[in-house]
Image (spheres, grey):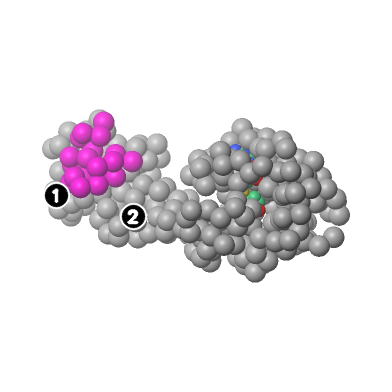
Amino acid sequence: MEKLSNPQVTIETIKKYNFAFQKKFGQNFLIDEHVLHKIIAAAGVTKEDVVLEIGPGFGTMTQYLAEAAKEVIAVEIDKTLIPILQETLADYDNVTLINEDILKVDIAALVEEKNGGRPIKVVANLPYYITTPIIMGLFESHVPLDNITVMVQKEVALRMQAEPGTKDYGALSLAVQFYAEPYIAANVPPNCFIPRPNVGSAVIRLNRWQNPPVEVKDEKFLFSLIRASFNQRRKTLQNSLVNGGIPVTKEQVVEALERLSLSPTIRGEALTLEQFAALSDILVEMR
Ligand code: SAM
């Protein structure tokens, strides 16, 4: 069977099933073979790998993953896609289809069952409306992961990869970089999808750190500190923290900054992950 990456095959499938794209599910299907090869290569998928695909759609990328990987687990929320997937993936005996909302799946249990708890790879053309909850959910629930290689909105990819002092740097950069090393593998224009999204896209690979770059006394506190620091970007760090509901006084923040040789008027966007971690530990001690 000719692959769905051939736009004509995708168009025929839409007609055959009278398929109506659902905006609420972020449905923009890939129709570019070159991009699909790039994603599989960027993820480094081999015949040893169990791959989790989030949102297979018509199964366009699943066809490539099934050929490259040992096993593919594909989780799709839209039940109208299941009979279509059963047809488009009929030639592959190494794909397990699950009709479920990925945010409700116990992925750690799935990895235990399918790969004996060994790290899997996550590869997806993500539904953009839930990019952050999906990625942070995978990291925070400590699912055994090798890497996550995903298509996301270009602007989000830039934020994930951003460095201190740049306009894209913020809470998302720090949250992602706490768990993984990001690398943008490709930029993808709207004409590679059907229907075309209104935004540019990018493929980003997030390599899970084997050893975390920082260790802190209280991870939850570190993340609330980071969120509060970027809630009001124009304010100084001490104002953002005190007004942002962090249980510390202005004097404590100033003293902590002084201990780190940082200016009392510094803004959150200037601090590295290491500096946020050090600040977090000092404030935890002072509480
Ligand atoms: N992988 C396909 C491709 O590249 O052509 C489709 C990608 S499309 C951007 C996103 C897919 O995710 C859609 O099939 C959509 O129905 C599915 N999806 C949306 N929300 C989901 C959720 N919460 N859980 C699982 N799948 C979801």
Q: Is residue 226 left or right of residue 103?
A: left
Most common secondary structure along the magenta stretch: helix
Instruction: Report the residue at 52% width, 63% height from top.
Output: 189
The quarter of the rendered structure image containing the C terminus is top left
Query: Which residue shows up at 72% across the image and 56% down it?
Result: 10
169 lies above or below 75: below
| The residue stretch that appears in magenta | 227-245
Q: Earlier in the sequence, mark 1 or mark 2?
A: 2
Mark 1 Cα-neighbour bin, 10 Å: few <14, some 14–19, many ≥20: few
Q: Residue at x 51, y 58 (%)?
A: 201
Q: Tell me if residue 210 comes above or below residue 21 in the rendering.
A: below
- At horizontal 24% and vertical 47% (from top left) the residue drawn is 233
Q: Which residue is label 1 attached to?
A: 265
CA distance separating discs 1 and 2: 18 Å
**Residue type at the position of mark 2:** Tyr
The kind of residue tagged 1 is Thr
Which of these two is toward me, 156 or 193?
193
Spot occupied by residue 143 in the image (x, y as percentages of width and height): 60, 43
Asked whether 32 falls inside the magenta stretch, the response is no
* Residue 126 % position (x, y): 58, 49
Find disc 2 in the rendering and name its residue.
169
State the image coordinates of residue 95 (x, y, percent, origin top left).
Answer: 79, 49
Residue 184 located left or right of residue 6: left
Q: Residue 1 vs residue 47: left or right?
A: right
Q: Taking the image as drawn, is residue 258 in sight?
A: no
Element on which disc 2 rests: loop
Q: Is residue 237 magenta?
A: yes
Q: Quadrant of the N terminus?
A: bottom right
